[in-house]
Image (cartoon, grey):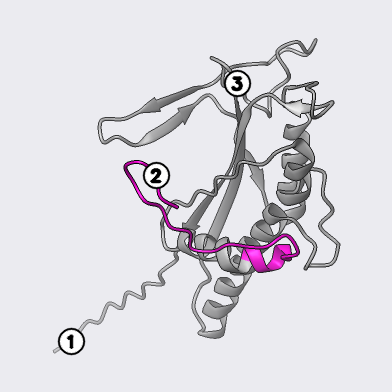
């Protein structure tokens, strides 16, 4: 694709009949593998109308369906947990201590001048606790967030429950194209912390005359 000043190329182009599994294998799983090596990964989608988001990304989805039909997020999440299990089993097979993993999720919405935490009660909710968190940039140019709820998760089912519950708090309004069109952008983040365990044997030998 050529613009006025810059040219862009596509790594992959998928036709309408393409299966979700094919998209994940080519575009998502290598990003997940990079996370285990300490790299950040981001998947940006622009989907319209709202039903495409639900069917493509996986809000309101079921995990236990045909793997070929699972949406992008469920397949990506399952790939992460399978990767954790595989890495732990590999070290056990080598008679080593398996690495430890901690995963938490955050869910934020970008709407006008506000950045609501989708895991906190809604702004108009009678429940206390609604807050608009903050995004900052440090001296190195890295972006970090302050004030967002981080929920610990231990399996793919818990991740998808967090995604579903947060999606219900997203702002929607009717448009000419969709009765419940999304009025914002959302960012669903998985933080994967890996702790590698090293066994150190100390021997103290003394020689006596």
Q: Nearer the viewer, residue 18 or 116?
A: 18
Instruction: Work out whether residue 195 can be spotted.
Output: no
| Left or right of 122, for residue 30 | left
Residue 120 location, x and y as percent? 69, 23
Q: Nearer the viewer, residue 22 or 209?
A: 22
Label located before the other in sequence (3 or 2): 2
| Label 1 secondary element | loop
Label located before the other in sequence (1 or 2): 2
Spatial separation of the CA atoms under disc 3 and disc 2: 29 Å
Q: Nearer the viewer, mark 1 or mark 2?
A: 2
Residue 81 location, x and y as percent? 64, 62
**Residue 100 is covered by the magenta coloring:** no
Q: Quadrant of the C terminus?
A: bottom left
Which residues lie in the magenta part? 1-24
| Left or right of 137, for residue 195 | right
Which residue, given by chain and number where applicable, does mark 3 sit on? 111
Query: Main SS of the magenta segment?
Result: loop
Which residue, given by chain and number where applicable, does mark 2 sit on? 3
């Amino acid at each position: 694709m050529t613009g006025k000043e810059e040219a862009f190329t596509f790594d992959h182009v998928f036709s309408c009949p393409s299966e979700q599994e094919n998209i994940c294998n080519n575009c998502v799983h290598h990003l997940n593998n990079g996370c285990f090596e300490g790299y950040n990964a981001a998947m940006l989608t622009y989907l319209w109308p709202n039903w495409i988001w639900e069917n493509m990304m996986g809000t309101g989805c079921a995990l236990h369906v045909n793997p070929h039909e699972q949406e992008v997020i469920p397949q990506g999440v399952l790939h992460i947990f399978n990767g954790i299990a595989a890495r732990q089993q590999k070290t056990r097979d080598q008679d080593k201590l398996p690495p430890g993993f901690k995963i938490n999720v955050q869910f934020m919405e970008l709407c006008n001048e506000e950045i609501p935490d989708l895991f906190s009660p809604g702004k108009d909710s009678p429940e206390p606790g609604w807050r608009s968190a903050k995004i900052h940039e440090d001296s190195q140019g890295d972006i970090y967030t302050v004030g967002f709820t981080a929920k610990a998760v231990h399996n793919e089912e818990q991740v998808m429950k967090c995604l579903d519950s947060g999606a219900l708090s997203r702002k929607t309004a009717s448009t000419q194209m969709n009765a419940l069109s999304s009025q914002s952008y959302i960012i669903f983040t998985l933080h994967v912390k890996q702790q590698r365990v090293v066994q150190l044997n100390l021997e103290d030998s003394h020689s006596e005359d």
